Each structure stands twice: as C-alpha cells, then as structure tokens.
C-alpha cells in the first residue's frame, strides 16, 4: 500500500508548473474518476516524439502513462486515484521532451478509434492489498499545504496507563523495518487506561523521480498486534463519545514533511 502525500482534488500549487500539461482533478462519489495530467500536442515528427516519450516511460515505470497517436498529433495522459510527486516529476520530464521536439499544444481532437497505447504497466507494489476489517483503518487527511492530501493507517486502541510510554516506544521502534516515516498519536486518559488514536504513514513519495516505497500493511499489522498483546492493549476506545475521545495532540514520535502531513 502506498502511504503518504498525494493529490486528487487539487493541483500542487507552488510546487509544479507546466507549459503543456493540464491538470484535471479527480471526481469522487459514484461517478468517480482518476486525477489526470493531460495534453494534446502537434509535432513536426510525432514518431520521433513518441519514441522519446517511451524512453521516459521505461526509465520511470511507476506511473500510469497513456498515449494516443495519429499523424502529427500525440495525446499524453498521466492518471491515477492518487497522484504522488513521482507522477508530477514524470510530467515535468515529459515537458522537456516536448520542448526538445518542438511540440505545440493544440485543441484539435484525435479521430475516433485511435488505439490507446499503455506506455507503462506499473506493477511495483508487491505488497498485499489493503483489506477492511483488520486493526488498521485506511484514512485520508484533508488538504494541507499545496493542496496536498495524505494517506495514512489509523489504529484506535487503549492501553493501561502504566504501559503507555513503553508501548509507544516499541511501536516507534517497528517503523524503520516497515519503511514508515510518520508516526504520531492523540490521547485521552480514562481512569487507569488511556485511549489512543495512532497514525502511521510516510511523507512525499517519488520526489525527483525517486522510487515509490510501499508498506506491507499485513506484516505491519501483525507486528503491531504482537506489541499490543505484550502490553495488554486492545482495539477500540473506552468510555463515551465525545468525553473520552482522544483529542489531545498530535504528539509526534516520527515525522517528515510535516507541513504536508499535519
């Protein structure tokens, strides 16, 4: 599972600028659709341009890059349900290729029936898919700096107050082994127990074309469950809502790219 910063509903204003690509935000709900970076260009040698685009696709395969070509026209689309920095970096790289091949933007439509070319087939996530019903809940944080959204794993639990510090210390110690760069929590004391709302995540992904880093939620959940058992922790919160809801925080134990996360 890919945790960390992404864009779906808004463009990363102030981080990226494009002369060719246009950003189309995602459409949520029943008629949902992916966020996209797209452009149609006309080029003196569209065949050579497409070949150069394929070189970029081979170098940076962790993105969905589609193309449609007809005569001097070439349409490129980068799309996903969560566009990371990696996707925007690939678009930046493609802009350089378009400039080198003297491409110009056009509103001319490609004829119907033009084959869709899948220039990449991202298959780099070899972790098990996230499944509902485990100790973690996959959540998304609302927009932060530069319109960034954030994918996290949330765990609601309670633990004896006397075990709180050692419990959190052991969870934090797990993070490097699972590539988790963000770990923070909210808390609320209830008698001799403490309610905790824990968040595990990462920061920005793929900045400068760096490979995306995926988290194996299944093995992370197993490791966290072992720590919970050792400290007498259990899922869920004690008491009632809203009086005993863990609102105190955030308390940060591990953090990167804080302005995009908190």
Image (tube, rainbow, N blue to C red):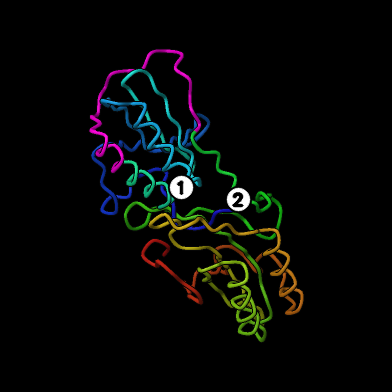
How far is disc 2 from disc 1 in space, using C-alphas? 17 Å
Asked if residue 194 lies left or right of residue 201, the reply is right
- Identify the mark nearer the N-term, 2 or 1: 1
| Secondary structure state at the residue bearing disc 2 | loop
The label shown at residue 59 is: 1
- Residue drawn at (32%, 54%) of the image: 146
Q: Say if 157 sits above or below 60 in the image.
A: below
Q: Which residues are magenta?
A: 95-118
Residue under circle 2? 125
Q: Which mark is residue 191?
A: none
User: Which residue appears farthest toward the bottom when viewing the image?
Assistant: 162
Q: Is residue 25 left or right of residue 172?
A: left
> Dot 1: few (<14), some (14–19), or many (≥20) neighbours within 10 Å?
few
Within the magenta stretch, is there residue 101? Answer: yes
Location of residue 120 in the rendering, given as x and y in whole percent from the top left corner: 51, 38
What residue lies at 43% left-to-right and 29% top-to-bottom?
67
């Amino acid at each position: 599972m890919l945790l960390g910063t992404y864009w779906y509903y808004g463009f990363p204003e102030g981080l990226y600028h494009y002369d060719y690509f246009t950003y189309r935000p995602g459409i949520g709900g029943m008629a949902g659709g992916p966020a996209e970076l797209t452009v149609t260009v006309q080029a003196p040698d569209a065949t050579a341009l497409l070949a150069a685009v394929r070189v970029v696709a081979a170098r940076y395969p962790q993105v969905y890059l589609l193309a449609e070509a007809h005569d001097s026209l070439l349409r490129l689309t980068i799309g996903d349900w969560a566009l990371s920095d990696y996707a925007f970096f690939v678009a930046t790289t493609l802009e350089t290729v378009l400039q080198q091949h003297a491409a110009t933007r056009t509103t001319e439509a490609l004829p119907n029936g033009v084959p869709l070319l899948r220039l990449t087939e991202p298959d780099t996530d070899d972790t098990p898919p996230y499944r509902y019903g485990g100790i973690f809940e996959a959540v998304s944080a609302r927009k932060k700096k530069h319109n960034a959204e954030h994918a996290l794993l949330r765990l609601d639990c309670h633990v004896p107050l006397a075990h709180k510090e050692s419990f959190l210390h052991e969870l934090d110690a797990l993070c490097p082994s699972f590539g988790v760069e963000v770990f923070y929590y909210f808390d609320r004391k209830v008698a001799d127990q403490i309610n905790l709302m824990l968040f595990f995540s990462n920061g920005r992904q793929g900045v400068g074309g760096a490979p995306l880093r995926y988290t194996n939620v299944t093995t992370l959940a197993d490791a966290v469950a072992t720590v919970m058992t050792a400290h007498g922790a259990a899922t869920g919160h004690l008491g009632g809502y809203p009086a005993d809801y863990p609102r105190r925080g955030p308390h940060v134990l591990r953090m990167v790219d804080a302005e995009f996360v908190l």
